[in-house]
Amino acid sequence: MILDTRHLETLMFLAHASVPPGQTLIGHVDPMEEIYIVQKGNGRIQVDEERREVKPGDAIHIPIGSFHELINTGKEEMTILVVAGLIPD
């Protein structure tokens, strides 16, 4: 799918992040819905009370206002794409 204005009207941002081995994207809460897409590496995600192991190709939905934290449990850098929706009015 090619993204254009039909899709981007509700997209706040698209970001790329990396987490070194043994490090953590510190847990936090955001005022918007997000999707993390794992590109490389292995880790463990927590969304509210749920914890899961993640690997390349996994997509994690993070609802508005949900606590989330990502830990790189592997031996290589972990990279993710972060897709965020608009902050609701």
Image (cartoon, grey):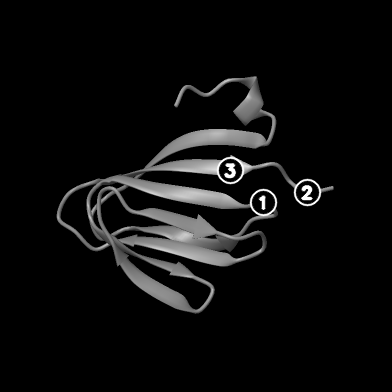
Secondary structure beneath dot 2 equals: loop
The residue under label 1 is: 32
* Residue drawn at (45%, 76%) of the image: 50
Q: Disc 2 designates what residue?
A: 88
Q: Which residue is situated farthest in the bottom direction here?
A: 49
Residue 46 figure quarter? bottom left
> Is there a contact, CB below 8 Å, between mark 1 and mark 3?
yes
Q: In the current view of this chain or complex, which residue is farthest to the right?
A: 89
What's the amino acid at mark 2? Pro
Observer-nearest residue: 70 or 84? Answer: 84
- Quadrant of the snapshot with the N terminus: top left
Amino acid type of the residue that numbered disc 3 sits on in the rendered structure = Ala
Relative to 60, is 3 above or below?
Answer: above
For residue 72, side relative to residue 75 (left or right) = right
Look at mark 3 in the image and give the residue it sits on. Answer: 84
Q: Secondary structure at mark 1?
A: loop
Q: Nearer the viewer, residue 32 or 72?
A: 32
Earlier residue among tags 1 and 2: 1
- Classify residue 6 as left or right of residue 21: right
- Residue 58 image offset from top left, x and y in percent: 33, 53
Q: CA distance from mark 3 to mark 2?
A: 12 Å
How far apart marks 1 and 2 lie (CA) works out to 7 Å
Q: Residue at x 39, y 74 (%)?
A: 51
Q: Residues within 10 Å of mark 3 (few under 14, many from 20)?
A: many
> Residue 81 at what x, y percent from top left?
41, 40
Q: Closer to the N terminus: mark 1 or mark 3?
A: 1
Residue situated in front as seen by the camera: 1 or 44: 1
Q: Amino acid at mark 1?
A: Met
Residue 80 at x, y percent in the picture: 37, 44
Residue 3: x and y, percent?
A: 52, 24
